[in-house]
């Protein structure tokens, strides 16, 4: 036998029992997005490396060490598997001038790629659902996006998350804060870890985002960006807070919330849980008013968020939420292969009428005994077995046997008039 191949480390197969949950989630996401009038966008998985270097920022975890970048052997282009989708959406919106007639509300879902140490809630291929509102400057869109996320939590029954909020102000305000921040960290340089020392002059704000508990104290005593915000930034922040308050959305203000990506300004937020260890952020976002210009588009404000799908599904499991695993409504038991033409035709009629129907099929050992077919019918989870026995068929009928109500009741129904008994199959579901 040839050597077995396995999937790439940190990249997972999503098998049917699991993908049923994904499909369920995706259905609710689509519905919720439609209710908020967000339109779907699908961008390529591969982009020019330069897009992410420019868009995400050179001194970020992602660009420094997490990107899957390679050279296209055929033309020498530097390409990268997208580590996130905001830069791509901005690229697409700019490339196709989508903002020419006003702001756009967009959403996406798909795989992202980051070379990280795989662990629960952290993978090398993972999936994000994202929402972006481009071309809108006011705090009401920040609020709308947060309400969109909370509506989604409600739709899927997620309860164990809380909202953390902060404002990063504007670049000039951050620059003033940065000076004081560097002073503070220089005074306590002995308490910085290697990452911290390296970031001290390149990106000191990101030190606040450290996951190293040994740096807790030096981070907590650092000057707060909030104290450097000017009138307009504070007004934006307070207006957002008033809209959240009016909607009964509770939140805490977390001055250390600075986000891993460089492009944010004003509002930043995360939905976090304590139930997934250090992978506790299930949704993260904020305003990125400078990104569009940075990527080469005509300057326009924007705000968005991204949800980690694996983490959300993991959290639902933690919560003990029952998630669907769709089963067929009927399973066709076929005692004799001679019945197959009629079986296939009947199942097609049932499917066309909206019934989920699975047929018994032969293995290398043939169709198998009546008894083993029944076992399979039962294991399929179907509500009814349709038995295409020779006697019934000779009379133009099929036996419908109930598999789930404990009675095992059965009756025969006419094949020529499916509409007459179709309802009983579905109303039991
Ligand atoms: P973290 O601090 O956990 O590394 P991040 O700040 O890098 O997260 P973002 O780039 O903001 O994450 O991505 C948004 C969301 O995508 C995260 O909150 C998380 O739910 C999810 N996510 C990010 N990286 C991964 C990963 N490697 N595996 C699974 N989910 C991820
Ligand atoms: Mg990360």
Image (tube, rainbow, N blue to C red):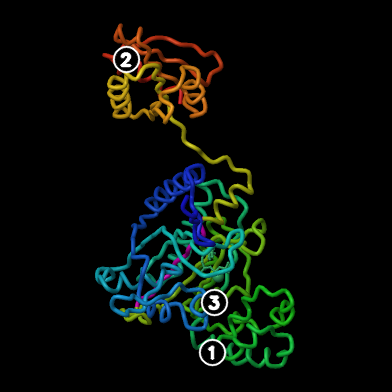
Q: Which residues are magenta?
A: 300-309
201 vs 332, left or right, is right
Where's residue 126, x and y in %?
Answer: 49, 60
Out of 41 and 104, give the one closest to the viewer: 41
Earlier residue among tags 1 and 2:
1
110 sits left or right of 122 in the view: left
Tell me which residue sits at (49%, 70%) in the image: 286
Q: Is residue 19 above or below residue 267?
A: above
Between marks 1 and 2 in the image, the one whose residue lies nearer the viewer: 2
Few, some or many residues within 10 Å of mark 2 (<14, 14–19, 20+): few
Residue nearest the observer in this picture, 181 or 16? 16
The reply to whether callout 1 and callout 2 are in contact (CB within 8 Å) is no
Percent of width and height locating residue 315: 60, 52
Q: Could you tell whether 106 is left or right of 262 in the image?
A: left
Residue positioned most to the front: 1
Local SS, label 2: helix
Tag 1 secondary structure: helix
Of badges 3 and 2, the one in the foreground is: 3
Mark closer to the chain start, 3 or 1: 3
User: What label does residue 61 carry, if any?
Assistant: 3
Q: Position of residue 349 (x, y in %)?
A: 28, 25
| Label ID, residue 420 | 2
């Amino acid at each position: 036998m040839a050597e077995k191949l396995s999937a790439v480390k940190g990249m997972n197969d999503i098998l049917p029992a699991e993908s049923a949950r994904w499909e369920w989630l995706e259905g609710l996401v689509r519905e919720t997005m439609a209710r908020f009038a967000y339109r779907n966008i699908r961008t390529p998985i591969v982009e020019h490396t330069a897009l992410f270097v420019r868009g995400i920022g050179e001194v970020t975890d992602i660009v420094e060490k997490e990107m899957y970048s390679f050279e296209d052997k055929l033309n020498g282009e530097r390409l990268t598997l997208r580590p996130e989708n905001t830069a791509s959406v901005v690229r697409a919106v700019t490339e196709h001038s989508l903002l020419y007639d006003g702001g756009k509300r967009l959403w996406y879902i798909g795989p992202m790629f980051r070379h990280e140490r795989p662990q629960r809630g952290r993978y090398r291929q993972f999936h994000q659902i994202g929402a972006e509102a481009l071309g809108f400057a006011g705090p009401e869109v920040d609020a709308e996006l947060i309400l969109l996320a909370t509506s989604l939590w409600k739709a899927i029954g997620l309860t164990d998350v809380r909202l953390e909020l902060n404002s990063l102000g504007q670049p000039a305000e951050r620059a003033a804060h940065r000076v004081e921040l560097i002073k503070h960290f220089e005074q306590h340089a002995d308490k910085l870890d290697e990452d911290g020392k390296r970031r001290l002059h390149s990106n000191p704000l990101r030190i606040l985002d450290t996951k190293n508990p040994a740096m807790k104290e030096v981070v907590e005593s650092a000057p707060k960006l909030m104290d450097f915000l000017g009138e307009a930034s504070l007004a934006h922040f307070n207006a957002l807070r008033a809209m959240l308050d009016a909607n009964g959305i509770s939140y805490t203000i977390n001055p250390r919330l600075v986000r891993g990506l460089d492009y944010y300004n004003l509002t930043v937020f995360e939905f976090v849980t304590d139930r997934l260890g250090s992978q506790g952020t299930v949704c993260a976002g904020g305003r990125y008013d400078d990104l569009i210009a940075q990527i080469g588009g005509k300057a326009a404000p924007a705000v968005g968020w991204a949800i980690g799908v694996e983490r959300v599904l993991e959290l639902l499991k933690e919560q003990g939420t029952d998630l669907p695993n769709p089963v067929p409504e009927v399973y066709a038991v076929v005692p004799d292969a001679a019945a197959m033409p009629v079986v296939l035709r009947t199942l097609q009629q049932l499917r066309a009428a909206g019934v989920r129907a699975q047929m018994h099929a032969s293995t290398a050992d043939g169709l198998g005994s009546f008894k083993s077919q029944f076992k399979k019918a039962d294991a399929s989870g179907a509500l009814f077995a349709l038995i295409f026995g020779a006697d019934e068929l000779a009379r133009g009928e099929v036996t419908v046997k109930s598999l789930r109500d404990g009675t095992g009741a059965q009756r025969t129904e006419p094949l020529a008039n499916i509409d007459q008994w179709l309802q009983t199959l579905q109303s039991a579901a």
